[in-house]
Image (cartoon, rainbow, N blue to C red):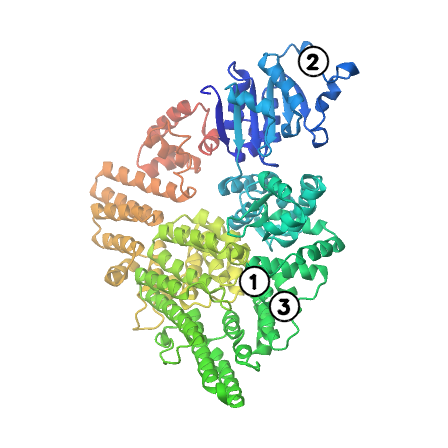
Amino acid sequence: MDSSRVRVAAPGEVQQSVLTGRSEDLASAVEALQGGTHVAVLLLGDHGIGKSRLMEAVAEELRGQVTPVRLHGSPALSHVPYGVLAPFIVDLPVEDATSQLAVLRTFWSYLEGQRRKTQKPLLLVVDDAHDLDEATAGVLVELAAAGWAKLLVGAVARPGLPEPLLQLWFEGIAERHDLRPLTREQTSEILAHQLGPQVLPNVAEVLWEASGGNPLLLDCLVDDAKSDGTLLQRNGVWLLARPLNSHGERLTDVVRRQLLRRPAAERKALNLVALAEPVSKALIEALVDEATVAGLIEQEIVRVSEEAEPELRLWHPVYGDTLRNLVSPARSLQLRQSLLRLMDREPASAEGLLRQVSWSMECGVEVEDRQLLRAAILASRLFEDDLARKAAAQVKDPELQFTARSVIARTYYNTSNHAAARDILEADFAKGRTLAGLLTGSLLWAAVLSALGHTPADIMHRAEALLRAGERLADASPAESERILAATRERVRTIRTMVLALAGDAEAAGAAGSDPADRDEGRLAASTLERAFGLALEAEQLLVQGKPDSASAAAAAALEAAGTEHDELYFLSDFLVVRAVTAVIHGGDWRAAESLLARFVAGFGPSLISFGGGVHTATGIVLLYQGRSAEAKRTLRAAVEALRLADPQQLFSLTAAMAFAAAADIGATEKAAGYLADYESARPPVSRYLRALAAMAVVYGKARLGGYRRAAEELQRLGRPDGDRNTAGLEFDALTFRLALGDREAAVRLRELAPQLEGRRARAVCGYAAAIGSGQPGELIDAAKTCEEAELWGFAALAYGDAANAYHAAGDTLRERMATAQRQRCRDRADSAAGDEPAGQDTLGLLTRRERDIVALAVRGLSDRQIAAELQVSVRTVEGHLYRSYAKLNIKGREELRRVSEE
């Protein structure tokens, strides 16, 4: 079998092959069919994976070289001998219809006639070959083995190819391609090709998860989401306005064609799994039969868990909503009753309970209040807000309605409708007639008020109503009075610690629950929250003091202390991740920031639509700090649009400020004006540190645009808002902005501040400030290299520029030129895309470094004389390098340089 080949094709290439015709897999298939070793190419993969597209691309590539004849398998003819060949053997006598030799002669006669017309070799293009009958497959193999025709065959991986066709591969005379699902990166590439480059990363993440990497399902989901307004474009950015609708028109059509044409037993099994998933495998086998279930598992339409009591789910989750939508209410009720007759207990998993309650509501069956409430809470955790509201609204028990209404408020918080959430929570605050009812929603109430701009003092004043309500409840229940009072006081302490942590108020750094109380379960949970919020507050205080490494450790400890079980404060992990990412970004640890954000995306999948905007904000700030302003503007632009829809962590104002700074940095005045208006109209961040940072970014942007003479004074005020108190971290940020603006006086204070600061970013910037003080070119070069190592490309370019000036003053022309070239390299690095070398690095690889430097300046629009002045060379030298560059690149002149540099 050495002569046979098996490849795993990249479906991203398959999708693009229709456009480019140059993918590796396409080339390999074409090469195999053109050569003399292989008589067939076999393409295998799931429904919708791209087999047909690749086959058509191969046939198109071979157009003019072969005579293509197309055959298509059909489920209706899969058990009819030679059924697919009927259109080609109409002249075959009836008595010879079962003779393979007669069929082969008649079919060959038809094919020979086609070949004579074109005088080209025959290529039989066979789609859906898994539906061919064995007899037809045998005829095709005979033709291929005899060398009369070559085969291009597509089939789903399960049930796979008929045995005769598979035998060609076993014998080493066929090349086999197994097409795998799209990767996350390929999905992003396809979306960029379909929609344009400005697609939010969380859009690709959600669509990749929903489609399972299947290109056909991806196309359907994108089309349906665009049609119903779920996927929309705002200011050039594509984003998801709400969770995907899995029963759109195109997807429904695909599911109907793929699944509902199956035998009745399989359709029944699929409907039952869709309506009840996850559902016991034994139950479905009892209602249908074991063979049917085994067949669906074998064909990878249904997947089975590996638990002691296996459960079934649909292979593609998006099929579930579509199938449920296709089942009539009467049929759904009938199937539900048949399943319930065999069930001896409720579903073991939370997901199973949610589906059962949802199914019951769809059928109009009454559900017990506690089950409704459990389902509502679970749905809100999964950000299925519509289902959560529907289930919560049906709760009838007055005491349970407190929790039900808090769940509804939570769904509004998910979409940043804080006013609606407040109205619900305020109406119930301190009104419960039991301890559980009294405490329910109180933490979310405080978080909502913080988001709406209430100060910690105002919130705590309002929270006194909870203490008074606890006292009244304790008086009414003397036997429980001690527990009631302890629990309400504990809750008020937790509220206090939380709102102070949200605000980053250093005045109360030690206010986190020092009062001992009973060690019952409620107290233990409250203490855990207090510790988490206390550490978060400590992290912000350390950040303000210029200790990002220590702040990062405190934030990590807060994440660990918080754990995972905090139902009412479901956003706690997101809040703590923001604190942790803020710390590592301030410190310049870009890898740690990337790792934290990657873990957030992986661990908080359901919340990506609501909370994903913050991920893009963090990435954009990193790029801005690195000096990559053009890319930062693009990323922050996407973040701004995402946060317009949902901003649970109140990051919109900060993001708009940073986008304004990035736009101002690159001279995009119109865009900058829009972002400034966004910042000025938005509610400021709750966090003290982020509020100050946003204000600094706005001052920096105004100075970049020109005419803001008070920039240095304003930045100094923002950096030292508390007089003698230690705000070295805030001051460092302010001084860094000043230094980036060319304010050399900032370097003096940075040198004084350096011993108090932590983090790679501070070391690099303060090292540059120290080199400015010495004025020695060697120290400036060392500082530039340190900035490069910290990936602070903007400051590295500034340091190399200062070194060039120092060398020029000393008359050292050679070193001056070297420093100037290094400055340009850092500028180019800052202008390149993330992870790439400067634009044109690969295309211009034939050029010397000096030629690349000159070409880069020419692409930017500088004249020969301006280039000469920039690089301190003669005009004739510039002209000579350009002419040699044109010859190497095989172009005629300047007008073609930009095109070549972008290739």
Q: Is 384 situated above or below 221?
A: below
How many C-alpha atoms fall within 10 Å of the one at disc 1: few (<14), some, or many (≥20)?
A: many
Q: Secondary structure at mark 1?
A: helix
- The kind of residue tagged 3 is Ala
Which residue appears at 55% of the width and 29% of the height?
20
Task: Give the labeled residue for mark 1.
Answer: 378
Q: Is residue 233 visible?
A: no
Q: Position of residue 804 (x, y in %)?
A: 27, 43
Q: Earlier in the sequence, mark 1 or mark 3?
A: 1
Q: Position of residue 835 (x, y in %)?
A: 40, 42
- The kind of residue tagged 2 is Gln
Q: Is 562 situated above or below 592?
A: below
Q: Earlier in the sequence, mark 2 or mark 1?
A: 2
Q: Secondary structure at mark 3?
A: helix
Q: Earlier in the sequence, mark 3 or mark 2?
A: 2
Q: Which mark is residue 114?
A: 2
Dots 1, 3 in contact, CB < 8 A:
no
Dots 3, 2 in contact, CB < 8 A:
no
Task: Give the labeled residue for mark 3.
Answer: 392
How many C-alpha atoms fall within 10 Å of the one at disc 2: few (<14), some, or many (≥20)?
A: some
